[in-house]
Image: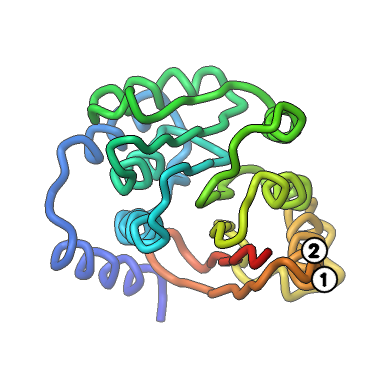
Amino acid sequence: MNQEQWNAMDNYLTSRLLPQDAALDAALEASAAAGLPSINVAPNQGKLLHLLAKLRGARRILEVGTLGAYSTIWLARALPPDGRLISLEANPGNAEVARANVQRAGLSGVVSIVIGAAAQTLDKFVTDGVEPFDMIFLDADKKNYPDYLRLSVQLSRPGTLIVGDNVIRAGRIADAANTDPDVIGLHEFFRLLAMNPRLDSTAIQTVGSKGWDGFSMTLVSS
């Protein structure tokens, strides 16, 4: 198998199961025009996040890493009328593009984008006693995933679903001697997932239009 075949399969699945969506297409186009990197989730992955949020019955969602708000839109659409999504973005330029994409999708009343270093924002949420979240999506710099996980658990309740994106890194995490800061961060992230008795976790590797990667899923049990 190769990247061309993975792309063809993602295109097949998307064309059969996901109808054309003007707001999502516009979000990708606006992000590309603004020079944002094309590291958003694939359409079928976005739909997976959407379905997970619906299955969880999420009323409050936290996203760490907004980029152009492509996954934000998928997640926000799964919320009930009184639901809220808070997305954290370190780059003000990205946040500006994201807010325009969210507004175009008609979700400005549902989504709040907070600018700043995610770990500092999360720590402030903990200190301020922010209401726990039902679902948390980690999709930011991998070297800081351990900090994001520690703080996310403090912002969770029993039954909270924590999804970590891009945790396979083309198989590099299987190399214990790898010195890439992102890989080192993910090694610690997996160690924390495994050692915390409150967390029930698994991870899946995937191939597709975004290459060879994968995600983790964690249920907070207590």
Q: Is residue 37 above or below residue 156?
A: above
Quarter of the image with the C terminus is bottom right
Where on the picture, by quarter, is residue 98? top left
Q: Amino acid at mark 1?
A: Met
* Residue 20 horizontal/vertical position (percent): 13, 49
Q: Is residue 220 above or below residue 133?
A: below
| Residue at point 31%, 48% (across, down) | 78
* Residue 115 horizontal/vertical position (percent): 58, 21
Q: Residues within 10 Å of mark 1 (few under 14, many from 20)?
A: few
Q: Is residue 72 above or below residue 138?
A: above
Q: Is residue 192 above or below residue 116?
A: below
Q: CA distance from mark 1 to mark 2?
A: 5 Å
**Outermost residue to the bottom:** 1
**Could you tell me how many numbered marks the image carries?**
2
| Residue at point 45%, 25% (across, down) | 112
Q: Is residue 29 left or right of residue 156?
A: left
- The residue indicated by pointer 1 is 195
Q: Is residue 81 left or right of residue 137?
A: left
Q: Nearer the viewer, residue 195 or 198?
A: 198
Where on the picture, by quarter, is residue 56? bottom left
Helix, strand or loop for disc 1: helix
* Residue 108 horizontal/vertical position (percent): 33, 23
Q: Is residue 110 left or right of residue 153?
A: left
Quarter of the image with the N terminus is bottom left
Whether residue 209 can be seen here: no
| Residue at point 62%, 53% (across, down) | 157
Residues at discs 1 and 2 in contact (Cβ within 8 Å): yes
- The residue indicated by pointer 2 is 192
